[in-house]
């Protein structure tokens, strides 16, 4: 019985530790809103979490996931019937000639992905509502050939493809 109590206490502390590890990144170096992109939703916060996120920027390995939690506010009088996320990473690939250089790579399962099921409220999003989208984003295996950093671009669009918000954040590649 005593072993089970210790195990339960350890698991409880470990789960609290994981939930406390999230980093709010909107004021940290490297985070920025996308240039020349109107922000139709008010971006309130972006938190990242995962095993490599004990310091900023997160250290992630290809094939491994990090969690993004984006809190937004619909600042218009219209309903948003559908949400779509479009998440890419830009990496510098080691190579020669046309094989190397910057490459934009879609995150697995996150290119034009339906996002309503990842919100804390149901779609449609009501006018002036605050809501969060939580996504586990996997670093693409193509990043194995990269070195240094990857810049993650996270777009939220409506069902018609209009960009509602867009930001970029760095990730250290392991």
Image (cartoon, helix red, strand yellow):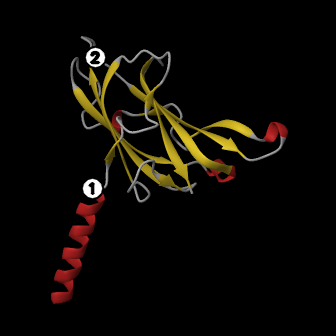
| Residue 15 visible to the viewer | yes
The C terminus is located in which quarter? bottom right
Who is closer to the viewer here, 48 or 25? 25
* Image quarter of residue 54: bottom left
Would you say 56 lies left or right of 147 here? left
Residue located 38% across and 18% down the image: 39
Q: Residue furthest right?
A: 97
The one nearer the camera, 107 or 126, is 107
Looking at the image, which residue is at 25% across and 31% down?
131
Residue 130 coordinates in the image, percent (x, y): 22, 28
| 166 up-or-down from 46: above or below | above
Q: Please tell me which of labels 2 and 1 falls first in the chain.
A: 1
Q: Farthest residue in the top direction?
A: 77
Judge whether 69 appears above or below 15 on screen.
above
Query: Residue 79 got which mark?
Result: 2
Q: Nearer the viewer, residue 57 or 110?
A: 57
The residue positioned 24% from the left and 11% from the top of the image is 77
Question: Quick check: 4 left or right of 83?
Answer: left
Real-space Cα distance between discs 2 and 1?
A: 32 Å
Classify 10 Å Cα crowding around label 1: few (below 14), some (14-19), many (20 and above).
Answer: few
Residue 171 horizontal/vertical position (percent):
50, 46
Q: In terms of secondary structure, where does tag 1 sit?
A: helix
Q: Which circle marks residue 19 in the picture?
A: 1
Q: Nearer the viewer, residue 155 or 100?
A: 100
The image quadrant of residue 50 is bottom left
* Residue ID at (44%, 57%): 52
Residue that lies at the very extreme toward the front in this rendered image? 29
Where residue 107 sits: x, y (%)?
A: 55, 42
Residue 87 position (above or below residue 65): above
Residue 172 placement (x, y as % from top left): 53, 50
Q: Secondary structure at mark 2?
A: loop
- Residue 1 in view in this figure: no
């Amino acid at each position: 019985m005593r072993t089970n109590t210790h195990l339960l206490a350890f698991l409880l502390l470990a789960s609290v530790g994981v939930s406390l590890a999230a980093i709010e990144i909107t004021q940290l170096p490297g985070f920025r809103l996308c240039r020349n992109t109107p922000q139709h939703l008010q971006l309130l916060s972006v938190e990242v979490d995962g095993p490599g996120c004990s310091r900023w920027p997160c250290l992630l390995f290809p094939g491994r996931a990090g969690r993004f939690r984006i809190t937004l506010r619909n600042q218009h009088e219209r309903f948003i019937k559908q949400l779509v996320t479009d998440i890419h990473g830009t990496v510098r690939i080691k190579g020669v000639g046309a094989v190397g250089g910057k490459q934009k790579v879609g995150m697995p399962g996150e290119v034009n992905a339906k996002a309503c099921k990842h919100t804390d409220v149901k779609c449609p999003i009501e006018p002036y509502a605050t809501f969060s989208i939580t996504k586990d984003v996997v670093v693409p295996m193509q990043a194995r050939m990269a070195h240094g950093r990857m810049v993650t671009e996270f777009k939220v669009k409506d069902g018609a493809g209009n960009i509602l918000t867009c930001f970029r954040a760095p990730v250290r590649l392991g």
